[in-house]
Image (cartoon, grey):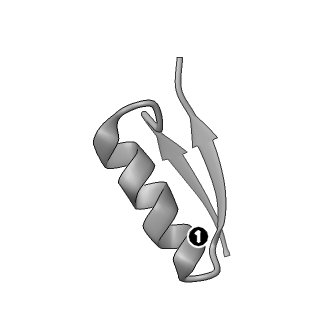
Amino acid sequence: MKVLVTGTGGQLGFDVCKELNKRNYKVIGVDK
């Protein structure tokens, strides 16, 4: 499954991306 995460420059967004990657999700991170 693909997931779009916004705010990946912050701590919470970064941690969410890291956890989703561990669970074999395809992550697309966006930050301004």
Please provide percent x and percent y for residue 14. 43, 47
Residue 30's place in the image compared with 28, above or below, is: above
Give, as a three-letter code, the residue at label 1. Answer: Asn
Q: Judge whether 3 appears above or below 22 on screen.
A: above
Around disc 1, counting alpha carbons within 10 Å, would you say few (fewer than 14), some (14 to 19), or many (20 or more)? few
For image coordinates 38% across by 55% down, the residue present is 15
Which residue has dot 1 on it?
Answer: 21
Which residue occupies 53% across, 17% down?
A: 32
Q: Which residue extends farthest bottom?
A: 23
Q: Residue at x 44, y 70 (%)?
A: 19
Residue 27 figure quarter: bottom right
Q: Position of residue 22 (x, y in %)?
A: 54, 78
13 lies above or below 26: above
SS of the residue at dot 1? helix
Quarter where residue 2 is shown: bottom right
**Is residue 1 shown left or right of residue 20?**
right
Q: Is residue 14 left or right of residue 23?
A: left
Q: Is residue 20 left or right of residue 24?
A: left
Furthest residue toward left: 12
- Rendered-image quadrant of the N terminus: bottom right
Residue 21 % position (x, y): 58, 70
Across the whole image, how many numbered discs are drawn on residues? Answer: 1
Residue 25: x and y in percent read: 63, 74
